[in-house]
Amino acid sequence: MQTYFIEKKFTYDGSQLHSLFAYLSYGILGPSVVAWKGKCAIPFQHMVDGEDLLAKAKIEGDEMLHFIIEVFDRDLFSGVALQRLFASIVRDYIQAHSPVPAVNESLRRDGDDIYLGDRKLSISIATKSPVSTMVHFAMNITNKGTPVETLSLEDIQLDPDQVAQDLMALLQNEYMGIVQATQKVRPVP
């Protein structure tokens, strides 16, 4: 799995969640995780989550840290499992690195989302294309422009650039460990 931090800020509007985004935009071929900072504003025509569509939910924020993960030859169940694994990695990382005591005591993962009390830190979706399975995961850098009560990286005193680099490395290591684990097992009769 390759990693790449995109220096240029740009808005995530859902159109980036397509197969080969990292390859066609940045030359990153194969399994990858890319990250960048930018606004989030997802119009209904790019919204993938049926629950959000039915609720006519607004998904937006003035500045978020975005990740797109793409893997190949995997089904949607594997994509959702990868999404939840990443959410667990994020929660563990934040609990280990945030100097805010409440974060260590009360930060929780519920499915693919991360909360402190009722304050939501993240958004996420997993989906499948004809050639790959993809995950978009994002965390609020600020609480400005969000339609619900949120938690942000500012609140928990973490630098988004460092968080991006560290989380991509952690996911890369976990993914490579999973791949290696599949290659050392003998078949059973």
Image (spheres, rainbow, N blue to C red):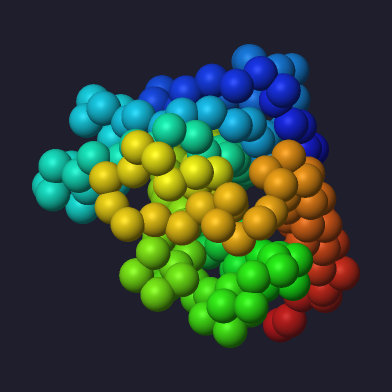
Q: In this view, does 152 lie to the left or right of 71?
A: left
- Can you give x and y, in whole percent of width and height, for residue 156 in the image? 60, 61
What residue is at 70 percent from the left and 25 percent from the top?
A: 6
Report the quarter where the C terminus lies: bottom right
In front here: 137 or 38? Answer: 38
What residue is at 46 percent from the left and 29 percent from the top?
A: 39
Tell me which corner region of the image, top left, top right, bottom left or bottom right, holds residue 4.
top right
Report the quarter where the N terminus lies: top right
Q: Using the rendered image of the protein, determine whether residue 66 is visible from the camera's viewpoint.
A: yes
Q: In this view, does 30 lie to the left or right of 59?
A: right
In front here: 124 or 149? Answer: 149
What residue is at 53 percent from the left and 75 percent from the top?
A: 107
What residue is at 65 percent from the left and 25 percent from the top?
A: 22
Q: How many labels does the image show?
A: 0
Q: Using the rendered image of the protein, determine whether residue 18 is visible from the camera's viewpoint.
A: no
Tell me which corner region of the image, top left, top right, bottom left or bottom right, holds residue 87.
bottom right
Q: Is residue 37 above or below residue 88?
A: above
In front here: 122 or 19? Answer: 122
- Can you give x and y, in whole percent of width and height, for residue 90 in the image? 63, 61
- Can you give x and y, in whole percent of width and height, for residue 54 in the image? 12, 47
Tell me which corner region of the image, top left, top right, bottom left or bottom right, holds residue 2.
top right
Q: In this view, does 171 lie to the left or right of 115?
A: right
